């Protein structure tokens, strides 16, 4: 049985108190919400913490406020969000993405803030300490080499958050707070193409809210989310496709297509979006745009399934997601 290391658990009731602890303890402290990612990572000893700051008793981090845009508190539970009327009615593809995360049991613990901050994943990293020691670890934690690309100076671990590509496609923003103040940035800018240093936010900053823009509401935007994984539940994705389309009549005015699980960040398929703009979404145009997604996906051998097959199947999934967004029967 894997055991948690010892650490000091803080359970602040107010945001300011949590931010003060994070500022004071620096890299020795980590926040925890549902713990469905952090606890396994601490048990496997590839993440470490002397102080863990639980966010679950902080009322300021709860709630869904719908008023034009929709603001979701960071510790809102995934299982509640996937059924929340503000999401199901106005951002159905996001509700679907959230509903595809892990399993009902884990969604009853996991939070949206924890999902957007999910650690990147890799076959050589998401293993027990003993397993990793047997290969002399890897660059992401304790080692020197990347076993996926041994001559590479960087880590290629994959961002597998299911909400992240959909939030980026919808143009969502994230509110960050530290003891020094607050700022709001596009969710797209929260991520960095680096398997180790995968978030741009500072360690003393907390995600406090996710903001869904009014212009991505279902009355103005057609959207879809599709995920490929080995089993229909519990498994992380090996590919996900998030689509958001804004139309002038039946012609595409603007489009965002974002791929998940193929890079260290939610990866925009700009070629696909560019091909769609100005077109009527008929079967041929959808197929032509989807074909361009192959260039945006260069999966590596660090997750389930053969990487070449994952690359080949990408246009198929992009085509299905686009058809689903515009209601073309496959
Ligand atoms: C078996 C299994 C299957 C899974 N399958 C999936 C899947 O299919 N798709 C998927 O996306 N995820 C999956 N997960 C991962 C996880 O369950 C979800 O990503 C979940 O949303 C994480 O939320 P949490 O609140 O539990 O995060 P936590 O574990 O509490 O935190 C995750 C990370 O975010 C940080 N953090 C948490 N809240 C904040 C905040 N407000 N501000 C700043 N940092 C914060 C933590 O320090 C930690 O680094 C799976 C996990 C398991 C164990
Ligand atoms: S991509 Fe390379 S460095 Fe990153 S976790 Fe995997 S093996 Fe380690």
Image (spheres, rainbow, N blue to C red):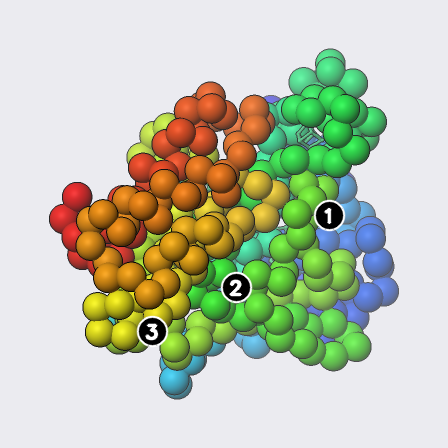
For marks 2 and 3 on the same chain, the one whose residue lies earlier in the sequence: 2
Q: Is residue 144 above or below residue 163?
A: above
From the viewer's perspective, tell me whether residue 272 is left or right of residue 120. left
Q: Secondary structure at mark 2?
A: loop
Residue at x 48% of width, y 68% of height: 171
User: Does residue 87 show up?
Assistant: no
Badge 2 density bin: few <14, some 14–19, many ≥20, Cα 10 Å: many
Q: Secondary structure at mark 3?
A: loop
Note whether ligand 2 is within 8 Å of mark 1. Answer: no
For marks 1 and 3 on the same chain, the one whose residue lies earlier in the sequence: 1
Q: Quadrant of the C terminus?
A: top left
Q: Are marks 2 and 1 in contact (CB under 8 Å)?
A: no
Q: Are marks 2 and 3 in contact (CB under 8 Å)?
A: no
Q: Nearest the camera: 156 or 97? A: 156
Q: Position of residue 116 (x, y in %)?
A: 55, 56
Q: Nearest the camera: 319 or 53? A: 319
> Dot 2 corresponds to which residue?
75
Note whether ligand 1 is within 8 Å of mark 2. Answer: yes
Badge 1 density bin: few <14, some 14–19, many ≥20, Cα 10 Å: some
Disc ID at residue 217: 3
Q: Are marks 1 and 3 in contact (CB under 8 Å)?
A: no
Which quadrant of the structure image shows residue 17?
A: bottom right
Q: Position of residue 311 (x, y in %)?
A: 45, 31
Select label 2 or label 1 by which is in front: 1
Q: Nearest the camera: 113 or 50? A: 113
> Dot 1 corresponds to which residue?
197
């Amino acid at each position: 049985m894997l055991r948690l290391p010892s650490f000091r658990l803080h359970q602040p009731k107010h945001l300011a108190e949590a931010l003060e602890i994070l500022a004071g303890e620096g890299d020795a402290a980590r926040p925890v919400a549902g713990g469905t990612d952090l606890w396994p990572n601490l048990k496997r000893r590839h993440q470490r913490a002397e102080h863990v700051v639980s966010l679950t008793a902080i009322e300021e981090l709860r709630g869904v406020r719908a008023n034009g845009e929709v603001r979701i508190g960071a510790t809102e539970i995934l299982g509640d969000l996937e059924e929340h009327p503000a999401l199901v009615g106005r951002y159905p593809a996001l509700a679907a993405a959230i509903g595809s995360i892990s399993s009902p049991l884990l969604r009853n613990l996991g939070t949206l803030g924890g999902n957007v901050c999910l650690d990147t994943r890799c076959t050589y990293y998401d293993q027990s300490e003993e397993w990793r020691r047997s290969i002399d670890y890897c660059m992401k934690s304790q080692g020197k080499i990347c076993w996926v690309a041994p001559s590479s100076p960087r880590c290629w671990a994959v961002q597998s958050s299911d909400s992240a590509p959909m939030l980026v496609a919808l143009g969502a923003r994230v509110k960050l707070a530290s003891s020094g103040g607050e700022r709001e940035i596009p969710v797209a800018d929260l991520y960095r193409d680096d398997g180790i240093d995968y978030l741009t936010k500072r360690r003393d900053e907390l995600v406090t809210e996710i903001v869904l823009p009014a212009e991505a509401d279902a009355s103005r935007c057609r959207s879809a989310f599709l995920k490929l994984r080995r089993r229909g539940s519990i498994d992380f994705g090996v590919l996900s496709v998030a689509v958001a389309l804004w139309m002038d009549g039946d012609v595409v005015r603007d489009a965002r297509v974002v791929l998940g699980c193929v890079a260290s960040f939610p990866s925009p398929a700009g070629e696909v979006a560019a091909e769609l703009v100005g077109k009527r979404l008929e079967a041929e145009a959808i197929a032509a745009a989807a074909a361009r997604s192959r260039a945006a996906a260069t999966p590596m051998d660090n997750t389930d399934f053969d990487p070449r097959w994952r690359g080949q199947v990408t246009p198929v999934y992009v085509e299905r997601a686009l058809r689903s967004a515009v209601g073309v029967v496959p």
